[in-house]
Amino acid sequence: MLSRLVNQAQPLEPTARVLVLGKGYSGRCFSQLLNALGTPVIGTRRKPDNNSTDIAFDSATDLQPSPGDLEGVSHVLCTIPPSQDGRDPALECLGPLLTKISPVWVGYLSTTGVYGDRQGQWVSETDPASPGQERSRRRLGCEQAWLNSGLPVQILRLPGIYGPGRSVLDGLKSGRARRINKQNQVFCRIHVEDIAGACLHLIHRASRGHAPSIVNVVDDEPTPSGELLVFGADLLNCNPPPEENYTDACRNMSPMARSFWSENRRVSNRLLCNELGYKLLHPNYRDGLRDCLMQSDQSNI
Ligand SMILES: NC(=O)c1ccc[n+]([C@@H]2O[C@H](COP(=O)([O-])OP(=O)(O)OC[C@H]3O[C@@H](n4cnc5c(N)ncnc54)[C@H](OP(=O)(O)O)[C@@H]3O)[C@@H](O)[C@H]2O)c1
C-alpha cells in the first residue's frame, strides 16, 4: 500500500521539485509517493490526458517541454525505454536542457537484462554486464550515455515489475496465465512501490554523499514463476493453470517470451538493502501479491 510507503518515507526538502520523464506505471507510483509527501512533480506523457497537469513529451514528435516548464527542477527520474535504434529518447531530445537546469540527482530506470544469462548464479553490480539480447545491448548503450552525460546519474537496474493491475493475479483472472516448468529456472521481480521507495531512498543517500552509479532494485527471493501462480491461485481461491513442460510450451511462445526464458539469474540486492539501508516494503512475492489483492479489493469497493 502506498500509505505504508508514505509512512516510512522521509520527505524531500521543501524547495525540491521533481521531473518524471515518462509518467507510466513506475513513474506514476513515484509521483504519487512524492505528492503524498508534499513535493511537487512535473510528469511527462506522450499524450497527456486533457484533465491532467502532465506535460507533453514525445521524442518521435516535436512535443517537448520548454525551459520555462522545467524551471526550478531539482531532481529527475527517467523511465523512458531506449528507442528501436538504441538511442536514448530523453537524453537525445532534452540532454542540453537537463544540463542547463543542473539537477542534484538523476535516476535512470534500466533493466537487469544487461547482465545476460548467468545460468542461475547470483550477480551483482560489480559483475560486468554481458547482455545476450539485442534489446539489452541497446539498454546498456543508454546506461552508458546517461553515465557519460555529465549529469549526477544513478542507474537503477530493475527485474520484472509487478504491482496492482500488473501481476499474476491479473493473468489468472483473465485466464491467460501459463504455468510453465523449466528445471532450475528462476525469475527476479520488484513491486512498483519498492521502485518508488528505492528512488526516494537513493536521493536521500546521494544528498549525504553516498551515490553508487549502478544499483540493483530487486526483492529478496528469485523464484520460479509457477510458484507465484500456485500462490496467486490460492489467494484468489481458484485452481492454478495446469503445469506445462517448458519444451512443449516453448513451441507456441512469442520470440519475446522465449528470450525471457532463455536467461536465468539471481540478482543481488545487497548494495541497496545492506549497504545503502533500504528496507523493502515487499521483500518477496507473497507479501507483494497479498498487497495486490488488497488494493484490487479496495478499488472494487
Ligand atoms: N515492465 C517491466 O517488467 C520492466 C522490467 C525492467 C525494466 N523495465 C524498464 O523500466 C522502465 C519503467 O517501466 P514501466 O513499466 O514503468 O514503463 P511504462 O509504464 O511503459 O512507462 C514508460 C513511460 O515512457 C514514456 N515513453 C515511452 N516512449 C517514449 C518516447 N519515445 N518519448 C517520450 N516518452 C516516452 C511513456 O509515455 P506514455 O505514458 O505516453 O505511454 C511512459 O510514460 C522502462 O524503461 C522499462 O523498459 C521494465
Image (cartoon, rainbow, N blue to C red):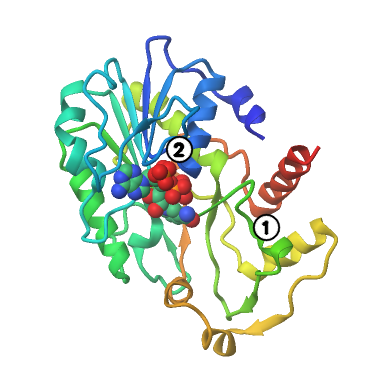
Please provide percent x and percent y for residue 73.
30, 20
Rendered-image quadrant of the C terminus:
top right
Q: Give me the disc on residue 228.
A: none
**According to the image, label 1 marks what residue?**
170
Please provide percent x and percent y for residue 120.
48, 71
- Position of 108 with respect to 54 (left or right) is left
Answer yes or no: disc 2 within 8 Å of ligand 1. yes
- Position of 64 with respect to 290 (left or right) is left
Q: Reply above or below: 195 against 50.
A: below
Rendered-image quadrant of the N terminus:
top right
Q: Give me the disc on residue 27.
A: 2
Q: Can residue 220 be seen in this view?
A: yes
Q: Residue at x 25, y 48 (%)?
A: 60
Cα–Cα gap, marks 1 and 2: 21 Å
Q: Reply above or below: 159 against 229.
A: above
Q: Residue at x 37, y 10 (%)?
A: 15
Q: How crowded is mark 1: few (under 14 residues within 10 Å), some or many (20 or more)?
A: some
Q: Is residue 215 visible?
A: no
Q: Residue at x 21, y 41 (%)?
A: 91
Q: Which of marks 1 and 2 is nearer the N terminus?
A: 2
Residue type pointed to by label 1:
Asp
Residue type pointed to by label 2:
Gly
Please provide percent x and percent y for residue 181.
62, 79
